[in-house]
Amino acid sequence: MGSNKIKEFLDKQKAVMDDKAAAELQHKKGKLTARERLDYLLDKDSFTELDAFAEHNSRDLEKKKAGDGVITGYGKIDKRPVYVYAQDFSFMGGSMGEMHNRKIANAMELALKSGCPIIGLLDSGGARIQEGVASLDAGGRIFQLNTISSGIIPQISAIMGPCAGIAVYSPALTDFILMVKKTSYMFITGPDVIKTVTGEEIGFESLGGSSAQTQKSGVAHFMADNERECLDIIKVLLSYLPQNNLETPPYHATDSASRETKRLQDIVPEDQKKAYDIKEVITEVFDKKTFFEVQANYAENIVTGFARLNGNVTGIVANQPKVLAGCLDINSSDKIARFVRLCDCFNIPLINLVDVTGYLPGTSQEHDGIIRHGAKILFAYSEATVPKISLVLRKAYGGAYIALVSKDMGYDKVIAWPNAEIAVMGAEQAVGIIHKDKIGKDPKIKEGLVKEYSEEYLNPYVAAGLGRIDMIIEPRSTRIALIKCLDMVISKREKRPAKKHANMPL
Amino acid sequence: MEEIVVKVDGREYKVFVEETDEGKIFVHSGSDVYEVETKKDVEQTAIERLQKKHSAETTNEVAAPLPGVVYEVKVKKGDKVKAGQSLLTLMAMKMENDVTAAKDGTIKDLRVKKNDNVNQGDILAIIE
């Protein structure tokens, strides 16, 4: 081979790798270039680039650049293989042309075939208008691959710049969305369209910035202060996930199995009316420094997240009594259902920490469809075949009891603290219904009946007597008991009748 | 960075405007970057607009987070309060729920008393 050919190749390769223009553009905005992001995300020297010389073939566009505005490839994070794509905002605003989209789709197909997570680092103005419908069509291929891959490989999308119009739907079809404060935003129609149509004036940040999407809409799961933190969160997140649905999450021994949880008695007030922070309970019970919250800023009345228990990754769903009394409502139903299904996809056992009286009452909840949203919780748990353990700390009433505790609905192990109240409803309401005729106008009669009802029914022993609860434990033995329960059921296998797919309430 | 649409000779272009710490203004269009000169007053309005946007997001109104009964009122009209301070508790879902101040200020109006029924979203107090 002539040395000219080799020189030509090396020059071309150099042009592909040239990051100067991109750096100039991105650094000013406090952003990294696509290459710098991949460098930071992946293990050193582990990256192999795919389709580096791909260009668009549009007749209407003169400007070309090898790579067509997206870097795709394969690399390793913590020695585990992943596929990645990173959009390059410095070429035509990272716009999604046909070739650009096909490159992403190629990486996704390889990720799916080889059972590796796929991570997208998005920074794009949206569809490349000049390429017309061809670019849209290739976008459709991405959506289809997102959907086919769902539940097979973990899919993570980090929004590191603009993500607008059709570009938002690929992230929305993935398992996790991360956003960076101040430099990233997502929306279907931007502020200018909204102004034209409705006359409302709203800025980019308030409309689709990281706080809007993590707190108000629940579209995004994590909010990072800056890009490096965002990439760090991806690495931590992957440490809790298996490579694909046929594997189990990585095991790391992190804490003693015989540690007593003595602080719980002080954290959780005996007076059932008093609130507390369930996250303190979680950090006391689960392996030290392993709690990793998911959707921390959305529907805070429910806490969802991963933590290790005796080294095994578990998915926690917990009522947060200090926010909206930890109730179930429309938003928290969505949050729970989505998290439970994610854990079920990736063989992560579920542990519920229950302390709630039920669903939030109100006209707006009813008219916004709490029935169909609340049904998602029942559906998600009933459908899940991973080990399911429920711990009742204090209250578990009515519908919330069925959703989060009921053995007949499929919980494998149910444990309760001695002061747990497991019943259809609270004493006041129950007495008001059962003894409607007796109560009359004398408050003393009602008082006596409430006391009687409370003593007789608001305890864990009625449920335990019926075999609805497996164990009653002291708060200090909570960790030990949960570890034993997990040990018992971690190897369980549950089979369901084959079907095309279920018709989940949406 | 702010995205705006500019009209040049009747054609519309979507560009990104960016202000650096040194006060320089850059306009990004596709992969092209142009530094532009601005008048001081133009910058001033941009900053003012940003501030307005910010202040619009912290509201003076304290709304009921969930439907319930006022159980305890801990402040009175004219009291100075700090962000995060508990103003009152609502008995709801069989629990005492703290309603806290979103920002520092003075209680300008207190619209509920003990044993009042409130609905989700009802304004309980105004802080200024």
Image (cartoon, coloured by chain):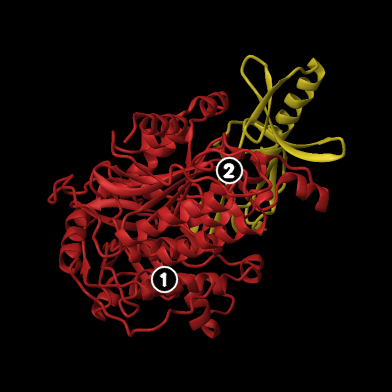
Chain colours: A red, B yellow
The answer to which of A436 and A216 lies nearer the viewer is A216
What is the quadrant of residue A235 in the picture? top left
Question: Looking at the rendered structure, which numbered label has been put on residue A124?
Answer: 2
What is the quadrant of residue A110 in the picture? bottom left
What is the quadrant of residue B75 in the picture? top right
The answer to which of A327 and B41 lies nearer the viewer is B41
Q: Can residue B73 be seen in this view?
A: yes
**Residue type at numbered disc 2:** Ser
Residue A230: percent from left, percent from top: 43, 38
Q: Residue at x 43, y 79 (%)?
A: A501
The single residue placed furthest to the right in the displayed view is B10
- The mark nearer the N terminus, 1 or 2, is 2
* Category of crowding for the residue at label 2, using alpha-carbon neighbours closer than 10 angstroms: few (below 14), some (14–19), many (at least 20): many
Q: How many marks?
A: 2
Tag 1, which chain? A
Q: Which residue is drawn at 28% across and 77% down?
A: A468
* Category of crowding for the residue at label 1, using alpha-carbon neighbours closer than 10 angstroms: few (below 14), some (14–19), many (at least 20): many
Residue A51: percent from left, percent from top: 43, 47
Local secondary structure at mark 1: helix
Q: Which residue is drawn at 52% across and 75% down?
A: A505
A467 shown above or below A377: below
Residue A299: percent from left, percent from top: 51, 54
Disc 1 + disc 2, Cβ < 8 Å:
no
Q: Distance between the residues labelled 1 and 2?
A: 34 Å
> In screen coordinates, is A354 left or right of B94?
left
Question: Looking at the rendered structure, which numbered label has been put on residue A380?
Answer: 1
**Residue type at numbered disc 1:** Ala
Residue A381: percent from left, percent from top: 38, 71
Q: Is residue B94 visible?
A: no
Q: Quadrant of the N terminus of chain A?
A: top left
